[in-house]
Image (cartoon, grey):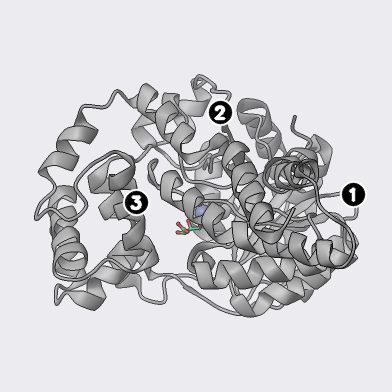
Amino acid sequence: MNSNEILTAVERELAATPFIDIHTHLFMPSLGALGLWGIDQLLTYHYLEAELFRSSSIRPEQYWEFSTRQKANLIWRTLFVENTPVSEATRGVIAVLKAFGLPTSGPDLTEARRFFEAQEPRAHIRRVLELAGVSEVVMTNDPLDPAEGPLWEKGAERDGQFHPVLRLDRILNKWASHWQVLGAQGYAVDEDAGGKSIAEMRRFLARWFELMKPVYMACSLPDTFQFPEDSVRGRLLAAAVIPSCREFGIPMSLMIGVRYLVNPALRLAGDAVGVADLRALEHICVRFPENRFFVSVLSRENQHELCVYARKFSNLMPFGCWWFLNNPSIVEEMTWERLEMLGTSFIPQHSDARVLEQVIYKWRNTRRTLAPILANKYALLSDDGRPVTREDIKRDVTRLFRGNFQEFAGHR
Ligand code: RAT
Ligand code: ZN
């Protein structure tokens, strides 16, 4: 194949391979009330809310008083009518509207609203996943969310396209405001996570493992994350969470580098990023060689180091270009680096979709950005003396976007 033929073959394979989206904030149909979809939710995505305040004089306190519809109207007018939607998050909304044949430059949202209101949720979910080229999505399930926990306790109906994840941020990052919630549920834990707390946490995790059957446990972590550490989080991780993952044979996902609420007035849009000390990760991989860790780091500056650690520890699986990194310029740089240092032994991307239809644009962007990168690697390889075949390309794309997750999670 010449380089044009290689590019076409890569594009075809990327389009034909159903991806597994290994981290999202979407919900299976039986948790429907928690799931976000439609134009008003797309427009009030927190990535867009952060952009609104740069182009409008509205103050956050005023904005939060609005209804969802009013917020969406304001964001549409500010970022899509009065300005050109060139940012990644705004362009995404345009791509979704286009995918459904809706107007992309109208003065208001009437037609889009009419379209989404007419959709039957379950059929719409199937259609959206199909359009996104995604066969399965991995959820983020919070057992201590009062709106979610009880639905699992009642035995929420499972769905083969949605896999649960036991998300532990409230426990590992917000113990001070949650240990009493655990206490009220009958777990004998205390403020310092001392005494019986560790054993009780293991009982809690075992119960939720049974209820949810999660494909992994997960936590986001600050840029200041250290391990080992004599803190509630350090103790809970080392003595409860990581050993439980091992016992149940599932990986732990560590998402490191958030600077929580640097601007609290922006709420969900108020987090920032900081460079983390990845020695914490080194210490975890050394101390728990029988465990497996999915790892995403938020700082651009930490990416190269993460690749180096992945070369040292085969129980570490780098994944995704997370949050502020999910822009073509940075995705490109990270993917080059990962292919060069790790071959095909990593997971290039997850969508982090919070609103159902976002998977359409996020995966379309990923395919578009990655095609020339993969094609370039194959062209270089051909130049160096090893022609690539369509079978090679198919095997690689399948490994990157399905196999690495399935194997690492022990999930087939
Ligand atoms: O990307 C995001 O939507 C963030 O707000 C976070 O949810 C992050 O992805 C996380 O899972 O903590
Ligand atoms: Zn997320």
The residue sitting at 63% across, 33% down in the picture is 208
Is tag 1's residue or tag 2's residue first in the polypeptide sequence? Answer: 2
Which dot, 3 or 1, sits closer to the camera?
Answer: 3
The residue tagged 1 is 290
Task: Give the amino acid type for the residue marked by disc 3 in the picture.
Answer: Ala
Can residue 228 be seen in the rendering of this structure? no
Residue lying furthest front: 2
- Quadrant of image for the C terminus: top right
Give the image location of residue 246, x and y in percent. Answer: 82, 43
Question: Of 357 and 85, which appears nearest the observer?
Answer: 85
Task: Give the amino acid type for the residue marked by disc 2 in the picture.
Answer: Gln
Which dot, 2 or 3, sits closer to the camera?
Answer: 3
Is tag 2's residue or tag 3's residue first in the polypeptide sequence? Answer: 3
The local secondary structure at tag 2 comes to loop
Give the image location of residue 44, x and y in percent. Answer: 27, 55
The local secondary structure at tag 3 comes to helix
243 with respect to 352 (left or right): right
The residue tagged 3 is 95
Q: Is mark 3 within 8 Å of ligand 1?
A: no
Res 4 quadrant in image? bottom right
296 with respect to 162 (left or right): right
Label 1 crowd (10 A; few <14 / some 14-19 / many >=20) = some
Is tag 3's residue or tag 1's residue first in the polypeptide sequence? Answer: 3
The residue tagged 2 is 161
Label 2 crowd (10 A; few <14 / some 14-19 / many >=20) = some
